[in-house]
Image: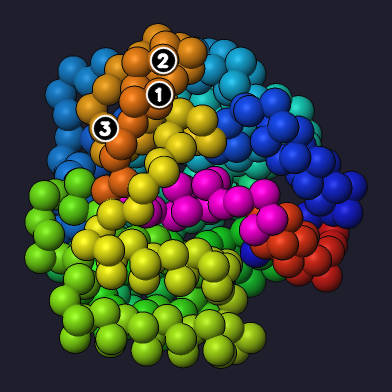
């Protein structure tokens, strides 16, 4: 969990309440490229996209300033495949307080020098994907040596004490047995961990989702262990979200009431807006997105971390926010 000053803690809390009251988005995911050097089994991305139409850093900055999200997530594909990544970070930083900038990467092109530069120009948190706590991660991502690279670079960065490295793992049939070991691996690296839920919307492979009674029973036991022993780990995902993942899978990968466009949205590589990463839509403005998609949206086919955390009730938002901010103040810089 990233170190954060009390002043900025207060700013984030009141800013989140303001965005909720004014019906502004809480989080925007900037998918600055769909090219990726991985080819993951659970994802619809993979490989380089020739002649991909890419918006400029200035355009991404304009969008963030217009939408004023609390959190701006830079993702892909893998963002390190864009040569102007540093410029994008600089352009989306509105001021020293916000947005809270998270960079999501598979980590293959990440190193200490890039960490230093990105930290200096405004990235608050680095989110690194991990599917398995060993070399099986390489096979799932189609990059030989990836796990060992992370095993080398992550501890070197966390040793600096900024508490800004988060491991993110997707819950699916193939990884259920590893959830505790993944949390242990993150702890070994002195990093936090966030869990997300696999969605068949990406690959159309419903077999990857734990929906059978025996699979759900196994998942329930693993989640209960993490919830009951969270003090032994650095688990950023709240109990309510972990339980929400179970509800999503037990309801055959469906949770109604999607607020895509209202609470969160995605910016495509070309600068057009989409409700989420799983909907192949393209809109010129948030108003158009809400009018043509969100008003009649009946999709409930995902419950990824972004949706789960931005669509909480006001009560859960305040309770989880208080827990997060309290923990942050204990590590004030």
Query: Which is more toward the observer, 96 or 220?
Result: 220
Residue 123 visible, this angle? yes
Q: List the single residue furthest toward the right.
A: 7
N-term-proximal mark, 1 vs 3: 3
The structure residue drawn at horizontal position 46% and vertical position 89%, both measured from the top left corner, is 225
Q: CA distance from mark 1 to mark 3?
A: 15 Å
Quadrant where the C terminus sits is bottom right
Q: Nearer the viewer, mark 1 or mark 3?
A: 1
* Crowd rating for badge 2 (residues with CA inside 10 Å; few <14, some 14–19, many 20+): few
Is 13 left or right of 304, judged from the image as shown? Answer: right
Q: Nearer the viewer, mark 2 or mark 3?
A: 2
Is 3 left or right of 71, judged from the image as shown? Answer: right
Residue 239, image quadrant: bottom right
Residue 191 location in percent, x, y? Answer: 56, 71
Determine which residue is flagged by label 1.
295
Q: Relative to 123, say whether 62 is above or below.
A: above
The structure residue drawn at horizontal position 48% and vertical position 13%, both measured from the top left corner, is 287
Residue 131 location in percent, x, y? Answer: 30, 68
The structure residue drawn at horizontal position 46% and vertical position 80%, both measured from the top left corner, is 183
Quadrant where the N terminus sits is bottom right
Determine which residue is flagged by label 3.
279
Instruction: State the extent of the magenta-drawn residues as a range.
Output: 302-316
Which disc is residue 291 wearing?
Answer: 2
Q: Main secondary structure of the magenta part?
A: helix
């Amino acid at each position: 969990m990233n170190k954060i000053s009390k002043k900025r803690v207060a700013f984030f809390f009141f800013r989140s309440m303001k965005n909720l009251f004014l019906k502004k988005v809480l989080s925007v995911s900037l998918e600055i490229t769909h090219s990726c050097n991985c080819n993951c089994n659970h994802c619809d991305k993979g490989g380089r996209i020739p002649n991909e139409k890419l918006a400029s850093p200035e355009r991404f900055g304009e969008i963030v300033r217009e939408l004023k999200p609390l959190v701006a997530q830079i993702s892909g594909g893998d963002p390190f495949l864009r040569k102007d990544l540093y410029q994008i970070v600089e352009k989306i930083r509105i001021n020293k307080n916000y947005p809270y900038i998270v960079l999501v990467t598979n980590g293959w092109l990440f190193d200490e020098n890039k960490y230093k530069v990105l930290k200096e120009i405004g990235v608050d948190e680095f989110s690194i994907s991990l599917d398995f706590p060993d070399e099986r991660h390489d096979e799932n991502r189609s990059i030989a040596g990836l796990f060992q690279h992370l095993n080398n670079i992550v501890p070197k960065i966390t040793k600096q004490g900024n508490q800004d490295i988060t491991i993110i793992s997707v819950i699916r049939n193939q990884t259920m047995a590893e959830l505790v070991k993944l949390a242990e691996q993150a702890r070994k690296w002195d990093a936090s961990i966030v869990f997300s839920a696999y969605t068949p919307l990406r690959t159309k492979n419903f077999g990857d989702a734990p929906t059978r009674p025996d699979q759900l029973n196994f998942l329930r036991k693993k989640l209960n262990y993490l919830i009951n022993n969270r003090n032994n780990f650095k688990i950023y995902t709240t109990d309510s979200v972990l339980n929400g993942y179970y509800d999503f899978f037990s309801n055959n990968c469906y949770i109604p009431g999607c607020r895509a466009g209202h609470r969160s949205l995605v910016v495509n590589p070309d600068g057009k807006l989409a409700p989420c990463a799983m909907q192949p839509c393209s809109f010129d403005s948030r108003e158009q997105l809400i009018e043509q998609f969100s008003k009649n949206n009946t999709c409930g086919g995902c419950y990824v971390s972004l949706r789960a955390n931005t669509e909480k009730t006001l009560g859960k938002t305040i309770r989880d926010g208080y827990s997060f901010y309290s923990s942050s103040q204990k590590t004030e810089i």
